[in-house]
Image: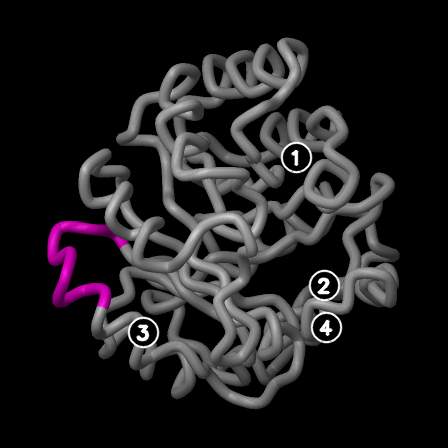
């Protein structure tokens, strides 16, 4: 690790950080402000997603978030790299996977989710507002994996709710009824911007509404001080990528 890694407390890293891998075409790409067409392979580790996951582990991170962009954007089957990454990780490292669950997936896509879930019991799945076709998407995912392994995704671009299918109120209402494990709150405009966290108010409000939920958020985190802002707002952990990449072995 770089000498700058001393700016991160190791216990905090282990307990509170989630390393992000945006996966497209078999490469880890650098997400910047949700402009997916412009994402380029990350410069560290030559964009190798398995090596990036292992580097996160070496840094002390024990949670890995994977956004399967091909599945999210093109409604394709889950990437085979999900299995390769999961197989490479230590048993205590957990996975959080967003494959753009819509609620109308093909039988083969559902079988892939089921197979990954059976092989890797520490994998959790996101039903995100951006992709969901209706409020039924959450219960549809629960036919494959239990609600204890489902996180509801709350997606924004700055102050704009990211869905033209369901309202924020409808999504939260169905989540309250279904009782998933928790929520992932994401501001796409802040992702990769190193502009500081923008979701603290939403996380605090959500924690007051759903005190038993595990809440994860991120976007714009520059350092441990930024991450602590989200933790103090009620998050159990924070999504990081841009701030950590320069500190990883190459």
Which x, y percent locates residue 138?
Answer: 39, 33
Mark pair 3, 2: CA separation: 34 Å
Question: Which disc number belongs to residue 202?
Answer: 3
Whichever of callouts 3 and 4 sits on the residue coming sooner in the sequence is 4
Question: Where residue 88 sits in the image (x, y, percent)?
Answer: 63, 32
Task: Tell which of 111 and 232 is nearer to you.
Answer: 111
N-terminal of the pair, mark 1 or mark 2, is 1
Q: Nearer the viewer, residue 180 or 123?
A: 180
Q: Is residue 151 left or right of residue 174?
A: right
Q: CA distance from mark 1 to mark 2?
A: 18 Å
SS of the residue under disc 3: helix
Discs 2, 4 touching: Cβ within 8 Å: no
Q: Secondary structure at mark 4?
A: loop
Q: Quadrant of the N terminus?
A: bottom right
The residue that mark 2 highlights is 249
Q: Nearer the viewer, mark 1 or mark 4?
A: 4
- Disc 2/disc 4 C-alpha distance (Å): 22 Å
Residue at the spot x=86%, y=41% of the render? 25
Q: Quick one: label 1 or label 4, which is nearer the N terminus?
A: 4
- The reply to whether callout 3 and callout 2 are in contact (CB within 8 Å) is no
Q: Residue at x 57, y 34 (%)?
A: 102
The image quadrant of residue 229 is: bottom left
Q: Which residues are magenta?
A: 206-214
Q: Is residue 105 above or below residue 25?
A: above
Q: Secondary structure at mark 1?
A: helix
Disc 4: which residue: 32
Q: Residue 7, position in %: x, y?
A: 48, 85
Question: In this orientation, which residue lies closer to the viewer: 134 or 24?
Answer: 134
Give me the C-alpha separation between circle 3 and circle 1: 31 Å
């Amino acid at each position: 690790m770089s000498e700058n890694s001393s700016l991160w407390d190791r216990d905090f890293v282990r307990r509170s950080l989630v390393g992000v891998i945006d996966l497209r075409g078999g490469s880890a790409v650098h997400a910047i402000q949700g402009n997916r067409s412009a994402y380029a392979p990350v410069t560290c580790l030559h964009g190798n997603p398995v090596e990036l996951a292992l580097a996160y582990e070496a840094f002390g991170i024990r949670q890995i978030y994977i956004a399967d962009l091909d599945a999210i954007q093109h409604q394709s089957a889950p990437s085979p790299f999900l299995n390769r990454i999961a197989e490479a990780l230590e048993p205590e490292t957990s996975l959080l996977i967003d494959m753009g669950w819509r609620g109308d997936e093909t039988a083969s896509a559902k079988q892939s989710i089921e197979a990954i879930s059976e092989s890797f019991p520490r994998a959790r799945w996101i039903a995100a507002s951006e992709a969901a076709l209706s409020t039924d998407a959450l219960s549809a995912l629960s036919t494959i994996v239990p609600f204890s392994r489902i996180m509801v995704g709350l997606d924004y671009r700055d102050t704009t709710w990211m869905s033209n299918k369901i309202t924020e109120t409808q999504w939260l209402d169905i989540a309250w009824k279904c009782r998933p494990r928790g929520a992932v709150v994401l501001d796409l405009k802040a992702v990769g911007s190193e502009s500081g966290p923008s979701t603290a108010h939403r996380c605090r409000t959500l924690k007051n509404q759903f005190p038993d939920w595990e809440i994860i958020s991120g976007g714009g985190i520059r350092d441990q001080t930024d991450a602590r802002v989200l933790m103090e707002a009620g998050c159990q952990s924070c999504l990081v990528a841009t701030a950590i990449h320069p500190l990883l072995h190459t």
